[in-house]
Amino acid sequence: MKKDLREVEALVQIVDEYAQVQKNIANLPCGYISVKQISGHTYCYRQWREGKKIISQYVPDALLSSVKRKIAVRKENEALLKVIKKDLKKATRKVVKSGLLTEEDVIALLDVAMQDGDVNAEVEKRLAK
């Protein structure tokens, strides 16, 4: 039983980490920087996709390094999110196999974490059932 509870604690930690990384990604710009030469002048644009359309937004030189850094941080967070999703899948399988929580419970925990709720309180409530 103690081992099962440790697995639930690990799941809670992964859920919190998942929610935090998702929020970080949501607050950072997506896309990439495109450099264009027009009439002998260099212009930088941030470009990203919305459906099938490519959207371009001019980036002034004063903001270029900041935008590049934010895009790089977003890409790092997206790579981290892939790893966290794998860990979350493994932890979910273990907890569901132990019978303490269901997949629906784990989805509810993710929802609570994304809304800045108390995941530990939610786990206690669901384990008490």
Image (spheres, rainbow, N blue to C red):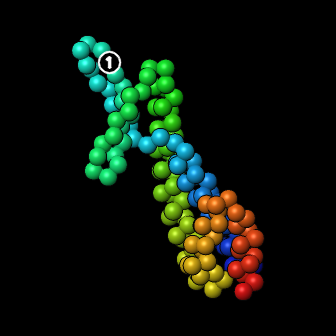
In this rendering, position of residue 6 left or right of residue 77 = right
Q: Nearer the viewer, residue 120 or 43?
A: 43
Image point (36%, 42%), residue name: 48
In this rendering, position of residue 41 left or right of residue 67 = left
**Visible residue check, residue 110:** yes
Image point (29%, 24%), residue name: 36
Q: Nearer the viewer, residue 6 or 119?
A: 119
Q: Residue under label 1, please give it.
A: 42
Image point (38%, 28%), residue name: 58
**Visible residue check, residue 6:** no
- Say if 51 sits above or below 111 in the image: above
- Say if 62 sits above or below 103 in the image: above
Report the label total.
Answer: 1
- Say if 61 sits above or below 95 in the image: above
Determine the residue located farthest toward the left in the rendered image: 39
In this rendering, position of residue 67 left or right of residue 124 = left
Q: Where is residue 35 in the image (x, y as percent from the top left)?
A: 32, 26
Q: Where is residue 38 in the image (x, y as percent from the top left)?
A: 25, 19
Image point (32%, 52%), residue name: 51
SS state under label 1: strand
Q: Residue 110's image quarter?
A: bottom right
In this rendering, position of residue 39 left or right of residue 33 = left
Q: Which of 115 and 6 is in front in this view?
A: 115
Q: Position of residue 109 (x, y in %)?
A: 63, 70
Q: Where is residue 88 in the image (x, y as percent from the top left)?
A: 55, 66
Q: Residue 45's image quarter?
A: top left
Mark 1 closeness class: few <14, some 14–19, many ≥20 residues within 10 Å: few
- Amino acid carrying label 1: it is Thr
Q: Say which quadrant the C terminus sits in.
A: bottom right
Q: Say which quadrant the N terminus sits in.
A: bottom right
